[in-house]
Image: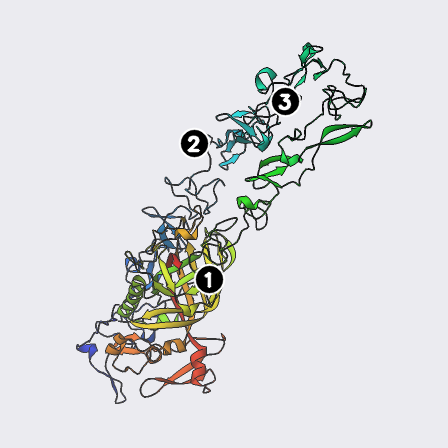
Amino acid sequence: MRKLAFVVLLVVGCGDNLARNNGDGSVDMPRCGDGHVDANEDCDDGDGNGGQGARCDVVCHWVCTDDASCNDGEPCNGAETCSDHRCVDNADEADGASCGDGKLCRNAVCTDSVCGDGFTTAPAEECDDANSVAGDGCDNDCKYSCMSTDSARNCTPTDACAGQGACNDNTHTCIPGTPLADNTACGTGGYCKTGVCTQPMCGNGVVEPGEICDHGTSNGMPNDGCKSDCTFACVDAANDCTTAAPACQMKACNTSHVCAPIADPALQGMSCGGGNVCNNGACVPPSSVCGNGVVETGEQCDLGSGFNGPGTGCETSCQFSCTTNPNACSDGNACNGVETCGAVTVNGKMGQKCSAGTAPPAGTSCGTNQICLMQTCVMSTCGDGFVDSGRGETCEPPNAGSCDAACHTIVCGDGVRAGNEQCDDGNTTNLDGCDGSCKFEQCHRVNYLSMAFGTDSYCTSNALGGSIVFGTAQDQLNGALTDGVADGSITIELAALGLDDLSGTSDPSLSLGILTGTPATGGTYNGGCTNNAGCTSDLDWWYTTSSSVINASRVPTTQTTASITSKNLSAGPSDIAITISLAGSPATLNMLAAKLKGNIGGVSTPVTSGGGTPGHLASEHLNPTLQSFEVMTGGQLCGNVTAGSLAAVPIPMALLQNCSQYTAANSLLDVIVGGCSVFIITVIRATQPDKTRSGTGSFTFQTDAQRRVSGCRNQMSQAVPLNTCLSDAAYSSSFRFTTDRVIAK
């Protein structure tokens, strides 16, 4: 940590530098700030030296003598000019104006041009719409979504069945083509179905191109007319029916393409052995007459003339229409019920015929990962309307409510990213990279921080910064802030709670949680930047969150409302607390009515961890397509620091060594109220608080002989309890910062 060191100037001379006789017996030694221009001084405006808009600085030299001496090195905030020895700011450059070397102006700050910043920078970019939405005319790589003259981007669909699209070269968006007609050939053996190239699948219960039949899982089963290759089981009986036909019958295919022998007319009346002859496909004695209503030798049944026939219970051959053992009625399809062969009475005579079974309810399991639909056994699929627990389904229909596209109930914390979940790390713990609602945690850390010593149009008052008037003191104080941010001892984090637009383009309502923590060890750590232009010094580094700034649910206890418009973040005003180091002394500053703003940069895919910092762990199951904004630049923080915060900070050692009027018993507030001079150089101007908690009235501190703040009066010069004053009185302040994305743990 840098030490605050002051250059001490001791002016010794003659002439105007000699003691000045006041004419009343008193003598003044010449000094800068006495209102007299002495030798070696360009000017002396007394108490006006070094103030806002002053022409004379704190060492009594002109603030400027020419335009060059006013140049702050920032090309985007307008060319500074010198007028009456005062530096005058001119109009800021327009956002998007080039400031050299691939950089551009944003909010008066020269920043690197990046894809996603909303400004098109040629030749690397064709467009830049500052969002992470693909296909809207400008993609995430800042190239047009389509161009009719570019064969790689002419809206040719990935699926030919969707039909050739057309590019609107004005908006660079694709106009969808007309889907090809169903059953149009596509790919290798595929066919178009509702605009999608689909491969036929024998056994899914749907007759598709190239198939003759498809009975689902009953394909190839006994008595099923469709083989396992989705062709008819019986077309040419002579070749397809492998079992010999009974005597007097011939092989045949019935209308269901099942082998079903029939009477062979060529054998009618012919001997079939045992003295029997063929009669309508039955081998019976010559005297037997099928149809006479009498069961005779060789007959199983006879219902009588006009009653025998196919499926009646007794065929025209006087044989039963079915057998019970084996059951000749089953068609192998469990989804239309189990067909049985049973006794029937027709015309007072007994026969046997098949009766249909009772079809089970739709959704009934009929095999591994198979269910009955429309009385057909088909493969169970997500979206069929039935929850198949056997294949891991827990809900239907998909993509409805808490049911994801794979028919799994979306449960945050189950370790499975589903539906609208951006991540799922197997728990509902906040501040571990994936929050309790399975949303990505967009957390940024301040990687550059400096105290401002003047005012501007955003931070219009700055009593705290304005009290530090000596340039070396200012440099060393900000040097201490730079060192603290770089080594991680100063860690201020902003957690974007309720952020809907991770690109940081627009979000009308969110909250910023104020966090502090310590960087994780491992790798090469660098937590700081050296300027206000923004960098990614510790991108996606892990930071262990201090337990003092979160509640039991690991939610920040200090939050401020915020909004994002056109990639500009604005937050506050709210009361917050930040922990920093002031000239080597740790300080927690309670800031009243604090507000901040920042310019949001481009998006990037979060870093993937190799098991340690930096990056997101594989166990978080982060959506691989997710992107979020990477940095904020040009940040400003204004707030009123309570006097009590300053009173709690011991006097910095550097001040103690150089401001001899103070001791270790003094606080930083004592020094600000009493001021500090080294010889004739004012280092800290004696400054009273300019703000109050209520926003009205004022307070004035008094000090004792040890220069300690010991009393307080209000604007009516009435004594006020010191504790009340320390709580209510405040100093306006101004800081500048940048951030990059980190992971709170």
Q: Give how far across and how far down residue 654 sits, in percent.
A: 25, 74
**Comes first in the chain, label 2 or label 1:** 2
Element carrying mark 3: loop
Disc 2 on helix, strand or loop?
Answer: helix
The residue furthest front is 274
Residue beneath label 1, please?
Answer: 512
Amino acid type at mark 1? Leu
What amino acid is found at the position of numbered circle 3 in the picture?
His
For residue 158, side relative to residue 323 (left or right)? left
Q: Residue 326 sits in which quadrant?
A: top right
Residue 37 visible to an observer of this rendering: yes
Q: Determine the image quadrant of residue 297.
A: top right
Q: CA distance from mark 2 to mark 1?
A: 43 Å
Discs 1/3, front: 3
Name the secondary structure under disc 1. strand
Mark closest to the chain's N terminus, 2 or 3: 2
* Image x and y of residue 8, in percent: 21, 74
Residue that label 2 marks: 152
